[in-house]
Amino acid sequence: MKKSTLVDLKDSEEKLRKQAKKIIRQKNVDALKRPTHLFMHEKGLTKIPVPKNPTHIIYAYYHNNQITKIENVDSLYNVTHLHLQWNKITRMEGLDCLHCLKKLYLNNNNISVVENLEGLKYLEELHIEKQNLDSSDGLCFDPRTMNYIGASLRILNVSENKITDMAWAKPLRRLEVLIAKKNDLTDFKAVADNLCTLISLVDVNFLVNPMTKKHRYKETIIARCSQLRVLDTVVLHGSSKTFMQNFDKIVRLRQLNERNKIANTNKGADDFFNLHMMAGPRAKSALSISEFSNQKPKLTAVDSTYTFMPRAFWRTRHPPSNKHQASSPPMEPPPIPKQPLNPEIKTLPLKGILKKPMPMKYI
């Protein structure tokens, strides 16, 4: 009896193993048959239908249809690529549940505001070019949405959207590629100031914008955005970037000096010397210099004991008045008078007369 029971147990174990292997094989076959791509493009759809097996979909294609509203995509919570370009969508909505979405294509639609993307914490690419082609208004950006996607967005395409400024791009701290061709950007200095804080930005394209035709456009963008490697599809070299950065620093320092320089007037000279606490004859000399309106003297004070007046004005300098002499001490002490050679003689000897008579033999 014992031998027969052992044989039966072995047979049952082999049967269980065979059944387990069959179940595993069937599961693998079913997994291979699961559709990961949903092809619904170019079918004349006006509405997004409810998908079958939505949990298996990773790539969803709805482009080239007549869709006007984003709906019935809440169940696609595993989708990573969503193609909705070339439709008639007017508003960005219904995308909050797509937490795994990485690439979103919405170009060639009628969207006016970039919004409602707060749930897409893994979004890396956003293609939203060519919106509102029939209207005169440019594309707008919701600040809350930009702050949220700024932690993950790496590639952004906003070409042909009638954009006039780039202030909305400041929160995109991880942005690497920005394509903004064929817009209405005119102030390249403001654009450079808005993009200079994006330390990850390496590729920028502003072709066919009004600002690209202005003087020193490229120099300013390269100098302010030191992290750039490609500008308008042109690769930037390290030596040219260094030169542009140094040149921009010099220009900005000169502009700062022009804004803060002291006027060449009597009041400007008074302010200058009040600031440096120098008064007296030096101030009088500076006042005489400031009266020359045709020339632009450079007033520099090296030390309180040295004069700073240029040589060109030494001859035309007016002597200081008694008022200034009384108010301040002289620049140098008066010379010490010479003592007579002979102590008995109180007067100095006349010039040309020797102090001792010459011997007769030399006469």
Image (cartoon, rainbow, N blue to C red):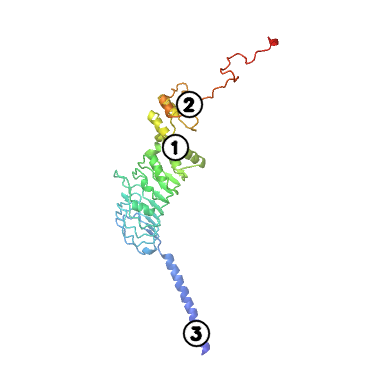
The spot of residue 87 in percent (x, y) is: 32, 52
Vertical order, 242 against 282 (above or below): below
Vertical order, 17 against 49 (above or below): below
Q: Secondary structure at mark 3?
A: helix
Q: Secondary structure at mark 1?
A: helix
Name the residue carrying label 1. 253
Type of amino acid at the residue the image marks with label 2: Pro
Q: Quadrant of the C terminus?
A: top right
Q: For residue 208, say whether it is visible.
A: no
The spot of residue 74 in percent (x, y) is: 33, 61
Which callout, 1 or 2, points at the residue further toward the start of the chain? 1
Q: Are marks 2 and 3 in contact (CB under 8 Å)?
A: no
Which residue is depicted at the point 50% across and 87% down?
5
Name the residue carrying label 3. 8
Q: Residue furthest front?
A: 344
Name the residue carrying label 2. 310
Which callout, 2 or 3, points at the residue further toward the start of the chain? 3
The spot of residue 107 in percent (x, y) is: 35, 50
Whole-number angstrom distance, CA of label 1 to CA of label 2: 25 Å
Vertical order, 290 against 353 (above or below): below
